[in-house]
Amino acid sequence: MSVNALAEQTSIKSDIEVLIVEDSVHLRRLMGIWLENLGYKVQLASNGREALEVLARSKISLVISDWMMPGMDGIELCREIRKNPQDHYIYIILMTARSFQADFIEALNAGADDFAPKPLYHDHLVVRLRAACRVIELERGLKAQHDRAKELYQQMENELEAAAKLQIELLPFDRKYGSIDVRSLLVPTSFISGDCQNHFPLPGGRVLAYQADIAGHGIRAALLSVTLQRVLTPSFCCWKNGEVLKAEQIVDRLNDRLLSKTDTPEYFTMFLTIVDPASGHVSYCQAGHPKPVLLHSQGAIEWIGDGGFPVGMLSEADFEEGTCQIAPGDRLMIFSDGVTECPAPSGELLGSHRLTEILNMLSMEKEAIGTNVEVQILEHLKAWHGSDLFPDDVSMLSIYAVKEK
Amino acid sequence: MLVEKDIDSHTKLVTLDTQRLDVLNAGTLKRQIQSLIEETPNRLVMDFHTVNFIDSSGLGVLVGLLKKAGAPDRLVICNLQPPIAEIFGMTNMDRVFSIYPSVDEALAAKAG
């Protein structure tokens, strides 16, 4: 192949900046002319130290350096370049008259990529430049892809963060319905959450309060949680004549409405209650959700519920209703499984027995339990986990019958 | 994540080779069991004795596989550790799946 044909194949490489490091003025200039004729942008240095100065101020992609030079030689220059990694790869060709195996190994270990034998011939150099350009262009392509991926990831992260904010805004405000005080707490695991809670008054004076935990994590879970919050409204809970459905009928209706038709069912567990503030009567439906606890004003702790089908999983699921009574000073606490399944640093899960211990401890401190028990449980949970970044969404809903003063 | 053993021409025993069945490996389990369901004529017995944690994604995949199998005795489960049995109980999945205390009982149930 003629030199011109070779030059054509290397094409114009004006975007690749080359640094020539050579102590012989004559050879340095000659190489400079060769490379400029091939279309490269060229910088010159007469030894390693000068080369480092040029590298510091220009965006050099390719270094062609003599091996033997006064001051800093080619090997040392390689080591210096590799010592401070740049944001792009610098390809290094060492020029040498040496031919011993050990010399090549030393140079490769120092960070050289290729060698050009001295005396230097134009077309030998051109072939090596082509090899260098292939590597440099590959690296540039990969870097561009990497940067693009990083940019997209950042964009997604920003959007998730915005979604998480919206989701927090969807959470109900703590509020009182007559003598019933309903409070909620939600700590999402990573931005958006699959747990959700809500409460609202029903026609006739009773209150609907629920907590749900959507299976899985991330965007799909969050979207289903938003759908649930949109669907489950006071009118959804009533017959056409305005009469309120029973707890298990509401869950059954939800199951019909949100039944998953995907291969792997998208479903959620929930604990749904209908509370009568006047009497303290609670009817509930436990749909695969962990057992809630009834904290009696006298300190007794009672776990309630016998389990039940999750919602959206099976069309043939039938749901059952249970009832309990909250007297003034009593509190019904609903937890997501992120509480009992919260791991200690050792990996051991909290479990319902340790949650019972925590609740026992809190109900000893009578003063405390009357107020923000969910926040206190959260503090215990952080201590158990050794951090406040939980691996699963942690949520609690507290339904408290206010004691008359 | 599965160790397979042919019991006879109609029955296959698969032992889960993991302690956790969760969002990270549920998809792999789904693919592997799905193809086994297709190639096993009668009965797939899943031995869960290694598993001590299952999350909602894991449970969802199991239900999806049971639907795929078409009948409860085509995909049966045995050897549940107490925490897993508790979750099956809490979600009524003990009514949906055929669950046996041991491999032997799961295999014998077929003859009976």
Image (spheres, rainbow, N blue to C red):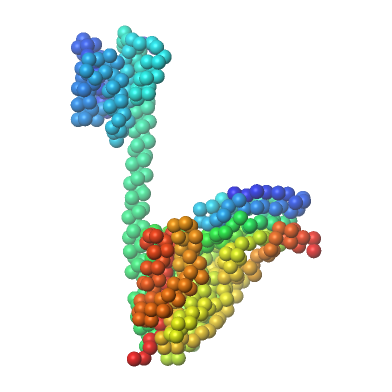
Quarter of the image for residue A130 reads top left
Asked if one can make out residue A54 in the rendered structure from this viewpoint, the answer is yes
Quarter of the image for residue A175 reads bottom left
Residue B99 in percent (x, y) is at 67, 64
Residue A77 in percent (x, y) is at 27, 23
Which residue ends up furthest to the top in the rendered image? A119
- Of residues A197 and B51, the one nearer the viewer is B51
Numbered marks: total: 0
- Of residues A52 and A344, the one nearer the viewer is A344
Q: Quadrant of the C terminus of chain A?
A: bottom left
Q: In this rendering, is residue A70 above or below A340?
A: above
- Of residues B27 and A51, the one nearer the viewer is A51
Q: Is A3 displayed left or right of A237 in the figure?
A: left
Q: In this rendering, is residue A145 above or below A288?
A: above
Q: Residue at x 35, y 11 (%)?
A: A98
Q: Quadrant of the N terminus of chain A?
A: top left
Asked if one can make out residue A36 in the rendered structure from this viewpoint, the answer is no
Residue A12 in percent (x, y) is at 29, 23
Q: Residue at x 32, y 55 (%)?
A: A158
Q: Residue at x 63, y 57 (%)?
A: B48
Q: In this rendering, is residue B12 above or below B78?
A: above
Residue A294 in percent (x, y) is at 48, 80
- Of residues B22 and A370, the one nearer the viewer is A370
Q: Is A380 displayed left or right of A300 in the figure?
A: left
Q: Residue at x 36, y 72 (%)?
A: A375
